[in-house]
Amino acid sequence: MKGETREMAGKLKKLRIYGILYFIFGFVDALNLLIRVWIGEYSVAQIVKSEFFNETVGTLVMVLEFFFTAIVVAAYLCLALKGYSYGIGEGYGYTHVKVAKIMPALLAIRLGITVLMIFGKQVDYISIVTDIVGLSTIFSYSRCARIALES
């Protein structure tokens, strides 16, 4: 019985840490997105200038990157809120478990688009780092969230 309690406490602590981590990722990704829009990095002219994409494909890739970044930011913030609240013992609901299930696909798609944008001379190191670290932690988050939900 005590072993289960210690294990549960460890899972809740991990959820709290993941909540903080995902809040940081969501905030940094959102700030990165806003700064990139502000300085004009989301520009079809810049992408076309690289001569890797024509105007239509460049616009499509740029819109997809923006769209998936916005979705990933929202997902990170959802996981942050729910993970932290469960970690401190005040959580309810299971939306974050569903979000955690689709998050690997979202992160993989965004990582693929970000790598594709490198050929358009638009390197976004922040997205690459948050995607890779997010992918490496999301499965553990999902396990901890399911265990916390079952208790």
Image (cartoon, rainbow, N blue to C red):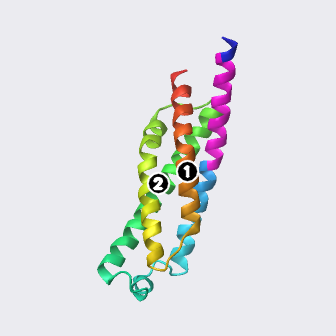
Report whether residue 18 is seen: yes
Horizontally, residue 98 falls left or right of residue 147, namely left
Residue 3 part of the magenta-drawn span: no
Mark 2 crowd level (few <14, some 14–19, many ≥20, 10 Å Cα): many
Count the marks. Answer: 2
Give residue 66's position: percent from left, percent from top: 43, 67
Check if mark 2's residue and mark 1's residue have beta carbons within 8 Å: yes
Horizontally, residue 96 falls left or right of residue 64, namely right
Q: Disc 2 designates what residue?
A: 107
Residue type (three-letter) at the residue carrying disc 1 = Gly
Q: Quadrant of the C terminus?
A: top right
Give residue 36's position: percent from left, percent from top: 54, 74
Residue 15 part of the magenta-drawn span: yes
**Which residue is found at the position 63% from the left and 24% from the top?**
8
Q: Disc 1 designates what residue?
A: 134
- Whether 125 is drawn above or below 150: the answer is below
For the magenta stretch, what is the residue range?
4-21
Residue at disc 2, secondary structure = helix
**Which residue is found at the position 37% from the left and 71% from the top?**
61
Residue nearest the observer in this picture, 46 or 85: 46
Residue type (three-letter) at the residue carrying disc 2 = Leu
Give residue 34's position: percent from left, percent from top: 54, 70
Mark 1 crowd level (few <14, some 14–19, many ≥20, 10 Å Cα): many
Give residue 9's position: percent from left, percent from top: 68, 26
Q: Quadrant of residue 1?
A: top right
- Whether 109 is drawn above or below 5: the answer is below
Q: Which mark, residue 69?
A: none
- Whether 129 is drawn above or below 102: the answer is below
**Which residue is found at the position 47% from the left and 42% from the top?**
100
Q: Earlier in the sequence, mark 2 or mark 1?
A: 2
Report whether residue 30 is seen: no
